[in-house]
Image (cartoon, rainbow, N blue to C red):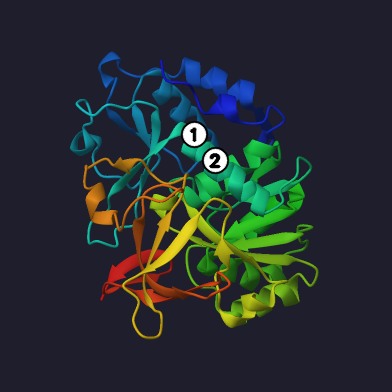
Amino acid sequence: MTAGLVELLSPRFTLHMGEHALGLDAIARHARETTLPANIAGRVVTTPARDPFEALRYIEACIQADALPVPSALCTTPTVLDARFTAIAGDVLVLRTSGSTGAPRHAVFHRDALARSAALIAADLALQPDDVVGLVLPCDHGFGLVGQLLAAAMVGARVQWAPGAFAQQRIAALAAGGATVLAAVPFGLAQLLAALPRCASLPPLRQVGVAGGALPRGLAQAALRTFPRVELVHQYGCTEAGPRLTSISSRNPAFWTGSVGRALPGVSIAVLDPDDAGEGELTFASPSAMTRYLEGAVESAQAGTPSASGRWLRTGDRGSVTADGLVFVTGRTDDVVKLRGEKVSL
Protein backbone atom coordinates (compact mmCIF):
# COMPACT_ATOMS: atom_id res chain seq x y z
CA MET A 1 0.00 0.00 0.00
CA THR A 2 1.29 3.48 -0.88
CA ALA A 3 2.28 5.61 2.10
CA GLY A 4 -0.13 8.42 2.84
CA LEU A 5 0.20 12.19 2.73
CA VAL A 6 -1.49 13.06 6.02
CA GLU A 7 1.18 11.23 7.98
CA LEU A 8 3.77 13.76 6.76
CA LEU A 9 1.88 16.74 8.18
CA SER A 10 2.35 18.29 11.60
CA PRO A 11 0.09 16.73 14.28
CA ARG A 12 -0.61 20.29 15.51
CA PHE A 13 -2.38 21.24 12.28
CA THR A 14 -6.07 22.09 12.58
CA LEU A 15 -8.56 23.03 9.92
CA HIS A 16 -11.35 25.37 11.03
CA MET A 17 -14.51 25.21 8.96
CA GLY A 18 -17.29 27.28 10.50
CA GLU A 19 -17.83 25.98 14.01
CA HIS A 20 -15.90 22.76 13.40
CA ALA A 21 -12.19 22.23 14.08
CA LEU A 22 -10.69 19.19 12.36
CA GLY A 23 -7.28 17.68 13.01
CA LEU A 24 -5.29 14.96 11.29
CA ASP A 25 -7.04 12.22 13.24
CA ALA A 26 -10.44 13.33 11.95
CA ILE A 27 -9.17 13.59 8.38
CA ALA A 28 -7.61 10.11 8.51
CA ARG A 29 -10.70 8.62 10.16
CA HIS A 30 -13.06 10.02 7.54
CA ALA A 31 -10.69 8.88 4.79
CA ARG A 32 -10.79 5.32 6.12
CA GLU A 33 -14.58 5.49 6.18
CA THR A 34 -14.73 6.70 2.59
CA THR A 35 -15.86 3.90 0.32
CA LEU A 36 -14.28 3.65 -3.13
CA PRO A 37 -15.32 0.94 -5.60
CA ALA A 38 -13.07 -2.11 -5.52
CA ASN A 39 -12.22 -1.70 -9.21
CA ILE A 40 -10.94 1.85 -8.69
CA ALA A 41 -7.39 0.64 -7.89
CA GLY A 42 -4.82 2.13 -10.23
CA ARG A 43 -7.32 4.52 -11.77
CA VAL A 44 -7.92 8.25 -11.59
CA VAL A 45 -10.63 9.68 -9.36
CA THR A 46 -12.03 13.21 -9.49
CA THR A 47 -12.43 14.73 -6.02
CA PRO A 48 -14.80 17.51 -4.82
CA ALA A 49 -11.74 19.50 -3.82
CA ARG A 50 -12.97 23.07 -3.54
CA ASP A 51 -13.63 22.14 0.09
CA PRO A 52 -10.23 21.70 1.83
CA PHE A 53 -11.47 18.90 4.10
CA GLU A 54 -12.83 16.97 1.14
CA ALA A 55 -9.54 17.50 -0.69
CA LEU A 56 -7.43 15.96 2.07
CA ARG A 57 -9.96 13.22 2.82
CA TYR A 58 -10.25 12.08 -0.80
CA ILE A 59 -6.49 12.22 -1.38
CA GLU A 60 -5.96 9.91 1.58
CA ALA A 61 -8.80 7.61 0.53
CA CYS A 62 -7.43 7.36 -3.01
CA ILE A 63 -3.93 6.60 -1.70
CA GLN A 64 -5.37 3.74 0.32
CA ALA A 65 -7.12 2.45 -2.80
CA ASP A 66 -3.95 2.81 -4.91
CA ALA A 67 -5.67 5.39 -7.11
CA LEU A 68 -4.64 8.86 -8.28
CA PRO A 69 -6.96 11.69 -7.17
CA VAL A 70 -7.51 14.74 -9.35
CA PRO A 71 -8.62 17.59 -7.04
CA SER A 72 -10.63 19.52 -9.59
CA ALA A 73 -14.35 20.12 -9.74
CA LEU A 74 -13.80 21.21 -13.36
CA CYS A 75 -11.87 18.12 -14.46
CA THR A 76 -12.72 16.21 -17.59
CA THR A 77 -14.57 12.90 -17.20
CA PRO A 78 -12.45 10.50 -15.12
CA THR A 79 -12.80 7.69 -17.67
CA VAL A 80 -10.85 9.83 -20.14
CA LEU A 81 -7.96 9.73 -17.65
CA ASP A 82 -7.99 5.97 -17.13
CA ALA A 83 -4.57 5.05 -15.69
CA ARG A 84 -5.03 1.33 -15.02
CA PHE A 85 -1.96 0.52 -17.09
CA THR A 86 0.24 3.27 -15.62
CA ALA A 87 2.38 2.37 -12.61
CA ILE A 88 1.70 4.66 -9.65
CA ALA A 89 4.94 3.90 -7.75
CA GLY A 90 4.59 6.56 -5.08
CA ASP A 91 2.69 9.12 -7.18
CA VAL A 92 -0.25 10.28 -5.09
CA LEU A 93 -1.82 13.32 -6.75
CA VAL A 94 -2.72 14.75 -10.15
CA LEU A 95 -2.99 18.53 -10.57
CA ARG A 96 -4.82 19.84 -13.60
CA THR A 97 -3.01 22.57 -15.55
CA SER A 98 -4.82 25.67 -16.76
CA GLY A 99 -4.41 24.74 -20.39
CA SER A 100 -1.86 27.10 -21.92
CA THR A 101 -1.33 24.56 -24.73
CA GLY A 102 -4.98 24.79 -25.79
CA ALA A 103 -6.15 21.85 -23.66
CA PRO A 104 -5.48 21.16 -19.96
CA ARG A 105 -2.93 18.53 -19.06
CA HIS A 106 -2.57 16.60 -15.85
CA ALA A 107 0.68 16.82 -13.89
CA VAL A 108 1.41 13.83 -11.63
CA PHE A 109 3.24 14.36 -8.32
CA HIS A 110 5.05 12.03 -5.96
CA ARG A 111 4.16 12.25 -2.28
CA ASP A 112 7.67 13.40 -1.32
CA ALA A 113 7.65 16.15 -3.96
CA LEU A 114 4.41 17.55 -2.53
CA ALA A 115 5.86 17.50 0.98
CA ARG A 116 9.06 19.21 -0.19
CA SER A 117 7.11 21.87 -2.03
CA ALA A 118 4.80 22.60 0.91
CA ALA A 119 7.71 22.75 3.35
CA LEU A 120 9.65 25.05 1.02
CA ILE A 121 6.71 27.46 0.70
CA ALA A 122 6.10 27.41 4.46
CA ALA A 123 9.76 28.24 5.11
CA ASP A 124 9.78 31.07 2.56
CA LEU A 125 6.66 32.59 4.12
CA ALA A 126 8.10 32.00 7.62
CA LEU A 127 4.86 30.31 8.70
CA GLN A 128 4.71 29.51 12.40
CA PRO A 129 2.53 27.12 14.44
CA ASP A 130 0.67 30.09 15.94
CA ASP A 131 -0.22 31.52 12.52
CA VAL A 132 -3.80 31.42 11.25
CA VAL A 133 -3.74 30.96 7.49
CA GLY A 134 -6.87 32.32 5.87
CA LEU A 135 -7.87 30.03 3.00
CA VAL A 136 -9.90 31.93 0.39
CA LEU A 137 -8.70 29.96 -2.62
CA PRO A 138 -10.35 26.78 -3.88
CA CYS A 139 -8.34 23.58 -3.43
CA ASP A 140 -8.75 22.33 -6.98
CA HIS A 141 -5.34 23.59 -8.05
CA GLY A 142 -1.84 23.82 -6.64
CA PHE A 143 -2.02 27.34 -5.18
CA GLY A 144 -4.80 26.61 -2.72
CA LEU A 145 -4.02 22.95 -2.05
CA VAL A 146 -0.21 22.94 -1.84
CA GLY A 147 0.68 26.61 -1.50
CA GLN A 148 -1.70 27.24 1.38
CA LEU A 149 -3.39 24.17 2.87
CA LEU A 150 -0.44 21.77 2.85
CA ALA A 151 2.12 24.51 3.56
CA ALA A 152 0.25 25.46 6.74
CA ALA A 153 -0.25 21.82 7.69
CA MET A 154 3.50 21.11 7.41
CA VAL A 155 4.31 23.51 10.27
CA GLY A 156 1.18 22.93 12.36
CA ALA A 157 -0.45 26.28 11.63
CA ARG A 158 -4.21 26.67 11.87
CA VAL A 159 -6.15 27.01 8.62
CA GLN A 160 -9.29 29.13 8.66
CA TRP A 161 -11.47 28.33 5.69
CA ALA A 162 -13.28 31.42 4.38
CA PRO A 163 -15.84 30.37 1.76
CA GLY A 164 -18.60 32.55 0.39
CA ALA A 165 -19.94 33.94 -2.85
CA PHE A 166 -19.26 37.53 -1.78
CA ALA A 167 -16.03 39.16 -0.65
CA GLN A 168 -17.72 40.52 2.49
CA GLN A 169 -18.53 36.95 3.58
CA ARG A 170 -14.91 35.87 3.18
CA ILE A 171 -13.60 38.90 5.06
CA ALA A 172 -16.03 38.26 7.93
CA ALA A 173 -14.79 34.67 8.23
CA LEU A 174 -11.16 35.79 8.15
CA ALA A 175 -11.76 38.42 10.83
CA ALA A 176 -13.74 36.02 13.06
CA GLY A 177 -10.97 33.44 12.79
CA GLY A 178 -8.18 35.93 13.49
CA ALA A 179 -6.33 35.24 10.22
CA THR A 180 -2.71 36.41 10.26
CA VAL A 181 -1.71 35.22 6.77
CA LEU A 182 -3.67 35.51 3.54
CA ALA A 183 -2.87 34.65 -0.07
CA ALA A 184 -4.84 35.30 -3.25
CA VAL A 185 -4.51 35.76 -6.97
CA PRO A 186 -4.36 39.46 -7.97
CA PHE A 187 -7.99 39.55 -9.12
CA GLY A 188 -9.16 37.99 -5.84
CA LEU A 189 -7.04 40.39 -3.78
CA ALA A 190 -8.55 43.35 -5.64
CA GLN A 191 -12.05 42.06 -4.82
CA LEU A 192 -11.22 41.78 -1.11
CA LEU A 193 -9.67 45.25 -0.95
CA ALA A 194 -12.69 46.78 -2.68
CA ALA A 195 -15.05 45.18 -0.14
CA LEU A 196 -13.10 46.09 2.99
CA PRO A 197 -14.62 49.59 3.48
CA ARG A 198 -18.05 47.92 3.85
CA CYS A 199 -16.85 45.51 6.55
CA ALA A 200 -17.05 46.16 10.27
CA SER A 201 -13.72 44.55 11.17
CA LEU A 202 -10.43 43.50 9.61
CA PRO A 203 -8.33 40.41 10.24
CA PRO A 204 -5.00 41.09 12.03
CA LEU A 205 -2.90 40.27 8.98
CA ARG A 206 0.89 40.29 9.10
CA GLN A 207 1.39 38.98 5.57
CA VAL A 208 -0.46 38.98 2.25
CA GLY A 209 0.73 36.64 -0.48
CA VAL A 210 0.00 36.92 -4.19
CA ALA A 211 0.63 34.44 -6.98
CA GLY A 212 -0.92 33.30 -10.21
CA GLY A 213 -0.10 36.40 -12.23
CA ALA A 214 1.76 39.68 -12.32
CA LEU A 215 1.03 41.98 -9.39
CA PRO A 216 0.15 45.47 -10.65
CA ARG A 217 1.98 48.19 -8.73
CA GLY A 218 -1.27 50.03 -8.02
CA LEU A 219 -2.76 46.92 -6.42
CA ALA A 220 0.35 46.42 -4.28
CA GLN A 221 0.19 50.03 -3.12
CA ALA A 222 -3.53 49.71 -2.33
CA ALA A 223 -2.84 46.61 -0.21
CA LEU A 224 -0.17 48.42 1.78
CA ARG A 225 -2.43 51.44 2.29
CA THR A 226 -5.10 49.11 3.69
CA PHE A 227 -2.63 47.14 5.84
CA PRO A 228 0.29 49.53 6.49
CA ARG A 229 2.27 47.01 8.55
CA VAL A 230 1.71 44.01 6.32
CA GLU A 231 4.39 42.27 4.28
CA LEU A 232 3.46 41.57 0.67
CA VAL A 233 5.01 38.42 -0.81
CA HIS A 234 4.83 37.63 -4.50
CA GLN A 235 5.54 34.03 -5.53
CA TYR A 236 5.86 32.91 -9.15
CA GLY A 237 5.57 29.41 -10.55
CA CYS A 238 3.47 26.98 -12.57
CA THR A 239 1.48 23.82 -11.94
CA GLU A 240 4.28 21.56 -13.16
CA ALA A 241 6.63 23.10 -10.56
CA GLY A 242 4.38 21.99 -7.74
CA PRO A 243 3.68 25.03 -7.86
CA ARG A 244 6.27 27.65 -6.75
CA LEU A 245 9.63 28.69 -8.24
CA THR A 246 10.52 32.17 -6.99
CA SER A 247 9.57 34.58 -4.21
CA ILE A 248 10.07 38.23 -3.33
CA SER A 249 8.94 40.46 -0.46
CA SER A 250 7.71 44.04 -0.67
CA ARG A 251 10.57 44.85 1.73
CA ASN A 252 12.99 44.12 -1.11
CA PRO A 253 13.45 47.19 -3.39
CA ALA A 254 13.46 44.87 -6.43
CA PHE A 255 9.80 44.07 -5.66
CA TRP A 256 8.89 47.52 -6.97
CA THR A 257 10.86 47.07 -10.21
CA GLY A 258 8.57 44.24 -11.33
CA SER A 259 10.85 41.32 -10.46
CA VAL A 260 9.21 38.09 -9.29
CA GLY A 261 12.23 37.47 -7.08
CA ARG A 262 14.94 34.84 -6.86
CA ALA A 263 14.62 31.08 -7.12
CA LEU A 264 13.57 29.25 -3.98
CA PRO A 265 16.21 27.03 -2.34
CA GLY A 266 16.94 23.97 -4.47
CA VAL A 267 15.26 25.47 -7.56
CA SER A 268 17.23 26.39 -10.68
CA ILE A 269 15.97 28.82 -13.32
CA ALA A 270 17.52 29.45 -16.73
CA VAL A 271 16.64 31.22 -19.97
CA LEU A 272 16.29 29.04 -23.05
CA ASP A 273 17.67 30.50 -26.31
CA PRO A 274 18.07 34.09 -25.01
CA ASP A 275 18.09 36.98 -27.49
CA ASP A 276 20.57 39.84 -27.47
CA ALA A 277 18.76 41.39 -24.51
CA GLY A 278 18.98 38.14 -22.53
CA GLU A 279 15.28 37.40 -22.88
CA GLY A 280 13.88 34.01 -23.81
CA GLU A 281 11.71 31.20 -22.46
CA LEU A 282 12.09 30.61 -18.73
CA THR A 283 12.90 27.01 -17.80
CA PHE A 284 13.29 25.43 -14.39
CA ALA A 285 14.56 22.39 -12.55
CA SER A 286 13.17 21.58 -9.12
CA PRO A 287 13.04 18.58 -6.77
CA SER A 288 9.37 19.48 -6.20
CA ALA A 289 8.42 19.20 -9.88
CA MET A 290 5.97 16.74 -11.36
CA THR A 291 7.15 13.25 -12.24
CA ARG A 292 5.22 13.14 -15.52
CA TYR A 293 2.06 14.13 -17.32
CA LEU A 294 -0.73 11.61 -16.96
CA GLU A 295 -1.09 11.75 -20.73
CA GLY A 296 2.55 10.70 -21.04
CA ALA A 297 3.61 13.81 -22.98
CA VAL A 298 6.26 15.03 -20.55
CA GLU A 299 8.78 15.43 -23.39
CA SER A 300 6.85 18.44 -24.62
CA ALA A 301 7.69 20.22 -21.36
CA GLN A 302 11.35 19.21 -21.19
CA ALA A 303 14.24 21.50 -22.13
CA GLY A 304 17.97 20.84 -21.88
CA THR A 305 19.85 18.16 -19.97
CA PRO A 306 19.10 17.24 -16.33
CA SER A 307 20.71 19.31 -13.57
CA ALA A 308 21.38 18.64 -9.89
CA SER A 309 17.84 19.89 -9.21
CA GLY A 310 16.21 17.54 -11.69
CA ARG A 311 14.93 17.75 -15.28
CA TRP A 312 14.70 21.12 -16.97
CA LEU A 313 11.06 21.90 -17.78
CA ARG A 314 9.56 24.71 -19.81
CA THR A 315 7.28 27.30 -18.22
CA GLY A 316 5.84 28.80 -21.41
CA ASP A 317 6.74 32.25 -20.02
CA ARG A 318 9.22 34.67 -21.56
CA GLY A 319 11.58 36.49 -19.26
CA SER A 320 15.12 37.13 -18.14
CA VAL A 321 17.40 36.46 -15.19
CA THR A 322 19.89 39.07 -13.98
CA ALA A 323 23.46 38.28 -12.98
CA ASP A 324 22.46 38.30 -9.31
CA GLY A 325 19.53 35.92 -9.88
CA LEU A 326 16.51 38.24 -10.07
CA VAL A 327 13.84 36.82 -12.37
CA PHE A 328 11.65 39.00 -14.58
CA VAL A 329 8.61 37.66 -16.45
CA THR A 330 7.80 39.68 -19.57
CA GLY A 331 5.14 37.66 -21.38
CA ARG A 332 4.23 34.32 -22.91
CA THR A 333 5.86 32.27 -25.65
CA ASP A 334 2.40 31.48 -27.05
CA ASP A 335 -0.69 33.54 -27.84
CA VAL A 336 -2.29 32.96 -24.46
CA VAL A 337 -3.04 35.50 -21.74
CA LYS A 338 -4.47 35.09 -18.26
CA LEU A 339 -7.69 36.99 -17.53
CA ARG A 340 -9.13 36.81 -14.00
CA GLY A 341 -7.23 33.59 -13.38
CA GLU A 342 -8.29 31.88 -16.62
CA LYS A 343 -5.93 31.41 -19.58
CA VAL A 344 -7.48 32.56 -22.84
CA SER A 345 -6.13 32.18 -26.38
CA LEU A 346 -5.83 35.43 -28.28
Could you say which is closer to the camera, residue 114 or residue 27? 114
Q: Is residue 338 visible?
A: yes
| Label 1 Cα neighbours within 10 Å, binned few <14 / some 14-19 / many ≥20 | some
Residue under the image location 25 percent in, 44 percent down: 76
Instruction: Give x and y (percent) for residue 114.
Output: 49, 39
Left or right relative to 251: residue 216 = left
Query: Residue 112, labelled with which disc?
Result: 1
Residue indicated by mark 2: 116
Left or right relative to 46: residue 175 = right
Instruction: Give x and y (percent) for residue 3.
Output: 47, 21
Q: Amino acid at mark 1?
A: Asp
Residue under the image location 71 percent in, 40 percent down: 157
Left or right relative to 158: residue 104 = left
Could you say which is closer to the camera, residue 337 or residue 52? 337
Instruction: Give x and y (percent) for residue 339.
Output: 39, 71
| Label 2 Cα neighbours within 10 Å, binned few <14 / some 14-19 / many ≥20 | some
